[in-house]
Amino acid sequence: MWRIGGVVVLSLVACKGPKPAQTGPAASGEPASATASTASAHAAPSDTGSHADPEPATTGAAHTGRPSTDELRTILQLVLDDSELDGYLHLGSPDRFPLKIAGEGLPDGLVKATKPVVVVTAPAADAPVVVFTEIDASADRATVRYRFGAENIRGTATLEKSARGWQLVQSRIIER
């Protein structure tokens, strides 16, 4: 009997205890889109255009969800580590390393190829800078849209959070 109790205790400890009761829109039955309309105070307005184009017409990242700084760092790090994106970055070329990024409200501590990334403001359209144009995150799903003008690409990354943490589940890059 004790052995079963020990397993339960270990499960609770490993999972950081039981989940608290759900409150807010999800508990009240409101659709997730009701919470997605909450924007951070520093967010740029988001274009509500077609989902066929992976980038709305914004210059900075529009945050339509409110992930914590640590979660945002994890989400963006997974996007930067995407092997599909690596093929376009050409970090060995002049002016490409360390990687430069731009967007609104980006967390510090992001790394690419062992060096911290450099956050820049207002890059030229053809600059070798990954510009995060939209970050839409909820408690368990995130969509990140970006562009990389030096290679004339636009990308969309979809991430999901599971018991193992955030994972990149889909990546789509379009060459223009």
Image (tube, rainbow, N blue to C red):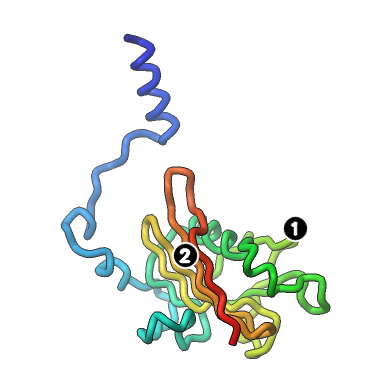
Compared across the picture, whether 115 is left or right of 132 comes to: right
> Closer to us: mark 1 or mark 2?
2
Q: Is residue 18 above or below residue 49?
A: above
Mark drawn on residue 12: none
Count of number-bearing discs: 2
User: For mark 2, what is the residue?
Assistant: 158
Instruction: Determine whether the residue tagged by mark 2 lies in a helix, strand or loop.
Output: strand
Q: Which residue is mark 1?
A: 114
Please state, as top left, top right, bottom left or bottom right, where the N terminus lies in the image: top left
**In which quarter of the view is residue 62 placed?**
bottom left
Q: Residues within 10 Å of mark 2 (few under 14, many from 20)?
A: some
**Lateral position of residue 145 relative to residue 113, left or right:** left
Give the x, y percent position of residue 144.
49, 70
Q: Nearer the viewer, residue 89 or 9?
A: 89
Location of residue 138 with respect to 18 vertically, above or below: below
Taking the spot 48% from the left edge, 79% from the top edge, the residue there is 54
x, y percentage for residue 88? 69, 74
Q: Residue 175: horizontal and vertical position, in percent? A: 60, 83
Disc 2 residue type (three-letter): Thr
Q: CA distance from mark 1 to mark 2?
A: 24 Å
Q: Which of the two labelled residues, at mark 1 and mark 2, occupies the earlier sequence position?
A: 1
* Residue found at x 40% / y 82%: 46
Tell me: 134 left or right of 93.
left
Residue at image coords 41%, 69%: 136
